[in-house]
Image: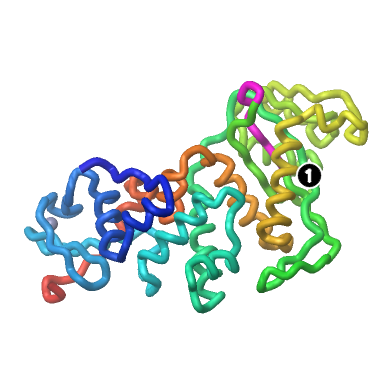
Amino acid sequence: MARPDFPRSIVDFQDRFPDDDACLEYLAASRWPEGFRCPDCGGERAWVLDRRHLWECAECHLQTSVTAGTVMHGTRTSLRLWFWAAYLVATHTPGISAVQLQRQLGISRYETAWLILQKLRRAMVAPERRPLRGEVEVDETLVGGYHEGRRGGRQRDGTKTLVGVIVEVRGEGSGRLRLKVLADAGQRTLTPWVKASVEPGAIVHTDAWKGYGKLGGAGFDHRPRPQRRDHPDAQKLLPRAHRAASNLKTWLQGTHRGVSPEHLQVYLDEFVFRHNRRGTPMAAFQALLGLGAQHEPATYRQIVRQGRSAA
Ligand SMILES: [Zn+2]
């Protein structure tokens, strides 16, 4: 059985996942693209137990949960609702708020929608992120001054947060992106941040800010542009970084009505996740549900072991 493909439209999606059983089958097909295989004895036959999403090996009776390692594990919310939430979050280009999710899925309690969204957002920080490479633009920008009310209201609170922006240069366009809340714009903050985000030897474009002064000695081909950052043409220096920062601010204010500083990094991660997967909705959908993690042996074997008496 091939790894399942991705529905191309909402109608497709509705046909594909009409109920929880269809979602379970998809989870099983994602977990066992070649058909069931017991993680313990290698057996290829299994019974599906009605409750708790369990597959039981016909040989050794080991029970494996198809939701193990996914955001849905242990949930009381229906799988179908999770699938819809992940689909909307993955395909809604500007992103989706808890209020929108609640309305679109007809979830009665705001808190439920909010929790689902928070869990999906957690998946947006990939555990292993390959460093950016080749040629990058690095800059910082000030974000915020708004505070997100519990139900999407907006309050001005005057605090701005410094956010670091690194984006790969891909011809005329942009490659992968990184965003990080920074404590300050000093060398002791900027140098380790760039080192943690960019492969050694990369060409690094910055403005002439002295905070970037140690990048050349840190193993990069540093090419600062000797122009003041308050110059009218300053934006042309690092066009990809400026475009990313501008899109980020529009997105934060439009979709999330601003975000308080302590939650900002989570939203930065969501923006980066969307940016870096903008052409691959299936990868986004599977990553949100936690299905991508099943390729990783370390997180794969979260198996529910229960005695034969449970069978
Ligand atoms: Zn077995």
Residue range corresponding to the magenta coloring: 164-172
Q: Residue furthest bottom?
A: 109
From the image, which quarter does the N terminus lie in?
Answer: top left
Q: Is mark 1 within 8 Å of ligand 1?
A: no
Find residue 258 and report its horizontal and vertical position in percent: 73, 60
* Left or right of residue 232, residue 11 in this image: left
Quarter-wise, where is residue 58 in the image?
bottom left
What type is the residue that disc 1 sits on? Thr
User: At 57% from the left edge and 48% from the top edge, which residue is drawn?
Assistant: 93
Name the residue that disc number 1 marks: 141
Q: Residues within 10 Å of mark 1 (few under 14, many from 20)?
A: some
Find residue 133 and report its horizontal and vertical position in percent: 58, 28
User: At 92% from the left edge and 36% from the top edge, which residue is drawn?
Assistant: 230
Find residue 192 and report its horizontal and vertical position in percent: 68, 39
Q: Is residue 116 above or below residue 171?
A: below
Q: Residue furthest front?
A: 11
Our reading of the magenta stretch's main secondary structure is strand
Find residue 43 and report its horizontal and vertical position in percent: 10, 52
* Left or right of residue 267, residue 66 in this image: left
Q: Is residue 77 above or below residue 263?
A: below
Q: Secondary structure at mark 1?
A: strand
* Quarter of the rendered structure image containing ligand 1: bottom left
Magenta segment includes 182: no
Magenta segment includes 168: yes
From the image, which quarter does the C terminus lie in?
Answer: bottom left
Q: Please name whichever residue, 264 or 309, is drawn nearer the observer in this view of the structure.
A: 264
Quarter-wise, where is residue 101 in the image?
bottom right
Q: Is residue 129 above or below residue 234?
A: below
User: At 16% from the left edge and 53% from the top edge, which residue is drawn?
Assistant: 38
